[in-house]
Amino acid sequence: MTANISYLTDMDGVLIKEGDMIPGADRFLGELSANGIEYMVLTNNSIYTQRDLSARLHSTGLDIPPERIWTSATATAHFLKAQVKEGTAYVVGESGLTTSLHTAGWILTDSSPEFVVLGETRTYSFEAITTAINLILGGARFICTNPDVTGPSPQGILPATGAVAALITAATGAEPYYIGKPNPVMMRSALNTIGAHSENTVMIGDRMDTDIKAGLEAGMRTVLVRSGISDDAEIRRFPFRPTSVINSIADLTDIWHDPFGDGSFNDNGEE
């Protein structure tokens, strides 16, 4: 039985889509759990805490423990704690980000913070953005949870972290450091959390520009699913390729132990 193979998987477009579970996602994750396969679910969404997302996923029929969810907010807190064990930050974002930083032992303040940390929120405040700009001009370092410029809503697209970061950069001249996908830093922190190695890990995603790029740069083999936003035409636009392309996560349900069907992961989970 495979012991060392591990999986990182994106959430939206791979496990759920528009609030509904993608058929086969529950069976795939169930196989991983039943066979002791390490995995982590990744999302660039920094709004919600791991517990919040676990509850939301449960309502779709997916039972994923909070500790199996790695958000750009938790990755950002992990990164900052590695840089400065207990620092200070001014945060523009929601509870997913503030909770992660508090848990990491950080102090949130608008009084001479070491960092300005920008995450996603549905209620970006002009006052908060102005404060962030002036703190950065005063010497605070600029960190962003993820580079996504837009997000979906029932009314259409919404400006997201990357778009607001561009506004702040225009006002300050300071370029942020982005933690979330496609930065492989997020992937590596997730791998470290589950004790996995990139050589024996597969990244599953629905986006070439984030999931597949990040997996590739982190040294993993990659699986692109067509159940999200990418199709064959989208794949051809990029100069790199995923290791494998499948229709949906359901296609991995029966081959989780040998995802590429070539024996590249043997019964010991080794190449």
Image (cartoon, rainbow, N blue to C red):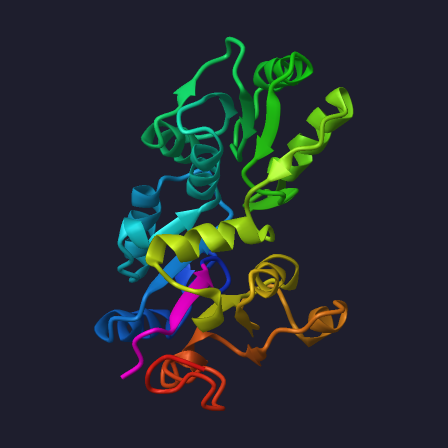
The foreground one among 260 and 131 is 260
195 displayed left or right of 211: left
The quarter of the image holding the C terminus is: bottom left
The residue depicted at 40 percent of the width and 19 percent of the height is 107
Q: Furthest residue to the top?
A: 111
Image position, residue 50 (x, y; %): 34, 44
151 displayed left or right of 40: right
The quarter of the image holding the N terminus is: bottom left
The residue depicted at 69 percent of the width and 15 percent of the height is 137
> Bounds of the magenta span?
1-10
Q: Is residue 160 visible?
A: no
User: Is residue 146 highlighted in magenta?
Assistant: no
- Determine the image quadrant of residue 6: bottom left
Image position, residue 106 (x, y; %): 39, 24
The residue depicted at 77 percent of the width and 26 percent of the height is 170
For the image shown, how many numbered marks are present on the structure?
0
The residue depicted at 65 percent of the width and 12 percent of the height is 138
Image position, residue 239 (x, y; %): 76, 69
Residue 185 sits above or below residue 41 on the image: above
User: Is residue 4 highlighted in magenta?
Assistant: yes
Q: Is residue 8 visible?
A: yes
250 displayed left or right of 161: left
Image position, residue 104 (x, y; %): 36, 32
Q: Furthest residue to the bottom?
A: 262
Q: Furthest residue to the left?
A: 34
- Determine the image quadrant of residue 48: top left
